[in-house]
């Protein structure tokens, strides 16, 4: 065994003896971050070593069928987990920027897996050109946002594949509703991305309404002592009732839907929207649409972050199913200055569309589920303008108000 591994084990044994609960609280965050970075470095070593072992075919000497099978047996690990690391080790040979960041512990195994899945044979040349950019996303962005960036990159460089996948999903849609022997019913469905999003948004809205009713009923009976165990329905029962409520609402309106709300609004940046128009026109004229490549930096999604393709946005916008940021004739956001404290409907939608998630750096709650708050508080002479508005989830909005109130109390009296 190499001396480096012996030293590593000795150092790990020393770390294992530390009682972290007795360490200064201010240092624990840095400790956890550093351990995560070191773990990523070890993962990079393991992937490289596994790939080398796989290439050596040494496992065949013991009659094993693969390197992953042999190592999984020796380490009592899940074979699929070892296969994943072995696969990544092989793929990393053609990903130099990813390897450099992985070896330094700047990105983790999940980042590497996402990048490797984007490095398809058909996209290898383009991936080599843009790999440094994508690795930069992995270093700087929260994981969910990084994943979204890589997904957008893949759709931008291979738009035909993205549209083909969307069409395949649409053609595969199906639904079944059947009665059981005792008269109960079973509903089962596969929906395409757009159809599912619209269905799920309304289901969740109805379910939330019923949840609020259940809590109101429980508090009316028990007061502040009520807990979720005192609710009259389980989550699954509320969801079933929400489905029935959706059917009743449809029947009451003759099957005609209401106006679209923010939950079913598609958001696209101007460059992407103009590009999809140019590509459609080029196809109509028998020209090559690839003359008009999509921008790599783009936003093409529902307001809650569910991705959609540019052509889906185009066709739904042509049917009037798209909200837009409200601006004045000069292109500036609608403003009410100090005349109004609360943000109006257009202003709320503007802030929720412009900023996809809660404004707190570590929060990933999507803006449709957030409150719209003043950046500079109203009490501190902040304006009720779209430029002074950002979405914040309820918890972080309350936290911000608490911190701001403490700062105000410490201000010297003029």
Image (tube, rainbow, N blue to C red):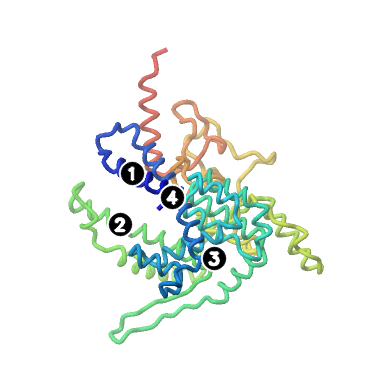
Q: Is residue 243 above or below residue 210?
A: below
Badge 2 crowding class, 10 Å Cα cut-off, few under 14, some 14 to 19, many 20 or more, is: some
From the image, tell me which residue sits under label 1: 10
How far apart are labels 3 and 4 at the CA level?
Answer: 41 Å
How far apart are labels 2 and 3 at the CA level?
Answer: 29 Å
| Disc on the earlier residue, 3 or 1 | 1
The residue positioned 54% from the left and 61% from the top of the image is: 90
How far apart are labels 1 and 4 at the CA level?
Answer: 15 Å
| Disc on the earlier residue, 1 or 4 | 1
Assign a secondary structure to mark 2. Answer: helix
From the image, tell me which residue sits under label 4: 42
Viewer-closest of 37 and 244: 37
The residue positioned 34% from the left and 68% from the top of the image is: 241
| Disc on the earlier residue, 4 or 2 | 4
From the image, tell me which residue sits under label 3: 194
How far across and down, in percent of the image, does residue 366 sit? Answer: 47, 50
Assign a secondary structure to mark 3. Answer: helix
Q: Is residue 318 visible?
A: no
How far across and down, in percent of the image, does residue 390 sit? Answer: 50, 40
Quadrant in the picture for the C terminus: top left
How far across and down, in percent of the image, does residue 327 sit? Answer: 63, 43
Residue 213's disc is 2
Assign a secondary structure to mark 1. Answer: helix
The residue positioned 48% from the left and 43% from the top of the image is: 391
How far apart are labels 4 and 2 at the CA level?
Answer: 51 Å
Pointer 2 and pointer 1: residues touching (CB < 8 Å)? no
């Amino acid at each position: 065994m190499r001396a480096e591994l012996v030293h590593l084990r000795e150092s790990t044994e020393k770390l294992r003896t530390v009682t972290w609960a007795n360490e200064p609280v201010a240092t624990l965050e840095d400790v956890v971050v550093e351990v995560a970075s070191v773990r990523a470095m070890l993962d990079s070593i393991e992937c490289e070593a596994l790939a080398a072992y796989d290439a050596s075919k040494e496992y065949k000497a013991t009659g094993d069928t693969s390197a992953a099978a042999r190592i999984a047996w020796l380490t009592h690990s899940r074979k699929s987990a070892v296969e994943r690391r072995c696969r990544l080790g092989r793929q990393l040979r053609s990903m130099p920027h990813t390897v450099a960041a992985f070896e330094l512990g700047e990105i983790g195994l999940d980042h590497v897996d996402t990048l490797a899945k984007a490095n398809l044979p058909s996209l290898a040349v383009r991936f080599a050109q843009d790999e440094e950019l994508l690795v930069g996303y992995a270093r700087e962005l929260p994981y969910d946002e990084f994943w979204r960036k890589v997904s957008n990159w893949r759709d931008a460089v291979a738009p035909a594949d993205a549209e083909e996948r969307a069409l395949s999903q649409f053609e595969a849609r199906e639904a079944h509703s059947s009665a059981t022997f005792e008269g109960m019913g079973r509903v089962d469905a596969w929906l395409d991305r757009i159809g599912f999003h619209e269905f799920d948004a309304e289901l969740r809205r109805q379910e939330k309404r019923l949840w609020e009713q259940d809590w109101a009923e429980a508090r009316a009976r028990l007061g502040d002592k009520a807990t979720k165990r005192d609710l009259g329905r389980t989550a699954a029962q509320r969801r079933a009732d929400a489905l029935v409520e959706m059917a009743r609402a449809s029947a009451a309106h003759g099957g005609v839907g209401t106006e679209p709300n923010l939950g079913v609004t598609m958001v696209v940046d101007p460059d992407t929207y103009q590009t999809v128009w140019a590509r459609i026109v080029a196809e109509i004229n028998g020209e090559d649409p690839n003359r008009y490549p999509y921008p790599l930096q783009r936003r093409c999604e529902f307001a809650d972050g569910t991705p959609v393709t540019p052509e889906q946005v185009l066709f739904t916008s042509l049917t009037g199913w798209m909200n837009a940021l409200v601006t004045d004739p000069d292109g500036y956001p609608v403003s009410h200055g100090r005349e109004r404290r609360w943000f109006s409907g257009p202003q709320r939608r503007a802030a929720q569309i412009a900023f996809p998630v809660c404004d707190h750096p570590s929060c990933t709650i999507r803006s449709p589920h957030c409150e719209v708050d003043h950046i500079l508080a109203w009490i501190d002479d902040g304006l009720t303008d779209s430029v002074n508005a950002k979405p914040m989830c309820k918890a972080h909005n309350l936290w911000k108000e608490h911190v701001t109130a403490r700062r105000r109390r410490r201000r010297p009296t003029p």
